[in-house]
Amino acid sequence: MTNHNGATGPAEHQPDPHGPTPVSRPAHGAHPGGPGVPDLDGAVDPIDCPEPDTPIKVRSASELADALPYILGYRPEDCVVLLGLRQRDGYGRFGGRVRLGIPARAEDWPAVARQLARSLIIGGEHRGDKSDAIVVFVCKEPTEGETGRRVRDRLQLFVQLLRTSCGDFGVPVVEALCISDGRFWSYCCPGGCCPPEGTSMGLPGSSALAAAATYAGLQVRGSLKEFQARLRPKDGAAPEQEAALDAARRTLRPRIDDETSRPAVTTATLDLARRAMVRLADRPTTPGRMDMDDQDDALLTHDEAAALIVGLQDRETRDEAAEWMEGTDAELALRLWRALARRCVGPYGDHAAAPLALAGWAAWSTGDNLEAREALAMALAADPDYLFALLLHTACNEGLGAEAIRECIRRGRAEREAAAEERAAAAAAAAAAAAAAGAEAGAGAEDRQSAAVGHEPSGVDDEATGADGELTAAGQELTATNRELTAVEREAEAAEGMGSSRPVLPAVGATALRSSRTGAALRRANARQRAAGGARGPRPKGPSTRPGGRPARSGGSRRQR
């Protein structure tokens, strides 16, 4: 593929080992290497498009450059892409691929070049997808005042390191293209075949290959920056959103850290998310992606977005939110997670890991591997230690089907629901036991109260009866004393009238003495009766009946002298 003056091989009907390269679905590739290596945001992975019924043949460097967006599914910008080629049935077919942003520092180029080569070649061999040859693309737009040719010259050393690293692993680089400012240059040109100003690529999508790819169902979904813009905070309203996040964090973080209040936060967060998804469902999608994002943003208040973002920092809450992974639920959840990722402003950039990971999972679950990888890569950029995103990113890049992950989530949901049912049943049984124990305790208390009512008043009534007897005796004695006193008074009057000198005072004194003793007895009897009445409690108005059947008398029925 180094002859740029014409086709890279014979005619279509004459297969050649180095001839036409059908654009077909590449096999699953390798994962990134070990610690200390660059974070490859697009490890070896399959093309995100249906495999065309008829292979699309690429015969020249120009067609190869034009085919790259259809191979990737987006227009690459500021990145290096390595495509593996497999020799099969006389054709070179695209295999795995790796993509990484071009390192800004030239001193990082050797390590990055070796890691990219290792990820594609060694990782592909581990997965049974050995590359027989490699095509390298470096895509970089010129800076202000820079030309595409200057970009080509500046990146030449990086491309040479890539070619050397691939050769060290035993796989040659058969083509290396620099794409910049709407033109391309080949680093593998033997000399003189490429004009110094580069070869124009024409308008995007205007070539015959682009038409064939579109007809075959391959689509270009914009640039990588456009994908990332849907998942990054927008300008404006950042202070208000940051203030709402501060308030939500102060309110919810202590409750999330508390084991007793955490379930309530989970329930409230998921309920709020469901209400937001209902609002999203009521608004039809718009043709423009950015217009739809603006519409979705308008449906969430700052406080709602803040409560959802902080609530999703809890692992159990996030795991339950991941269950919205199928059908309409997944589509609405993806829109919600995008909107929340755009609200992680200022110092809350690391909080975006949760909604970005959920967005990646929802996208992958609905078959959009391209957005899934980008969202998961951005989640790891926000928090490199976010395990949920790391596991999903690795599984997605290693070709593990989303259905396997969905099945794991379904099992987890079934286990959680079964555990909830067991807890509910245990709580109901405990409540029933407590109710039975309470009823039994109440019955025992009533029995004890009845027994107390049957026995305690009898002693009190006996005491009251004794007091009544004393009162009666004292009253009789007082009546007798009054009669004596009257007789003494009459005798004194008679004696005075008759002029008798018989002493009357001793008789009067004796009678008065008996009267004072009788009063004291009355007072003692009254005191005893009041004490007896207080022990029994207030008596009801009207006549009552003592245990013996005798009507009880109230204190007001007696006359006290």
Image (cartoon, rainbow, N blue to C red):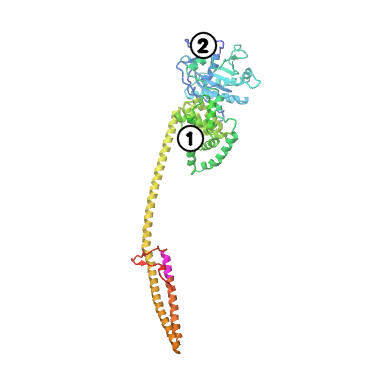
The residue pinned by badge 2 equals 9
Q: Name, please, the residue furthest toward the front.
A: 497
Residue 149 seen from this side: yes
Magenta region's main secondary structure?
helix
Residue 472 inside the magenta-drawn segment: no
Instruction: Tally the marks.
Output: 2
* Residue 534 falls inside the magenta stretch: yes
In the rendered structure, which amino acid carries the disc numbered 1?
Arg
Q: Amino acid at mark 2?
A: Gly
Q: Which mark, residue 228?
A: none
Q: Nearer the viewer, residue 229 or 543?
A: 543
Q: Residue 299: percent from the left, percent from the top?
A: 52, 32
Q: Which residues are magenta?
A: 527-536
Closer to the camera, 325 or 407?
Answer: 325
Q: Residues within 10 Å of mark 2 (few under 14, many from 20)?
A: some
Vertical arrangement, residue 2 with respect to residue 395, above or below: above
Q: How far is the residue under mark 2 from the one under mark 1?
A: 59 Å
Location of the C terminus (image quadrant): bottom left
Q: Residue at x 43, y 65 (%)?
A: 534
Q: Which residue is mark 1?
A: 275
Secondary structure beneath dot 2 equals loop
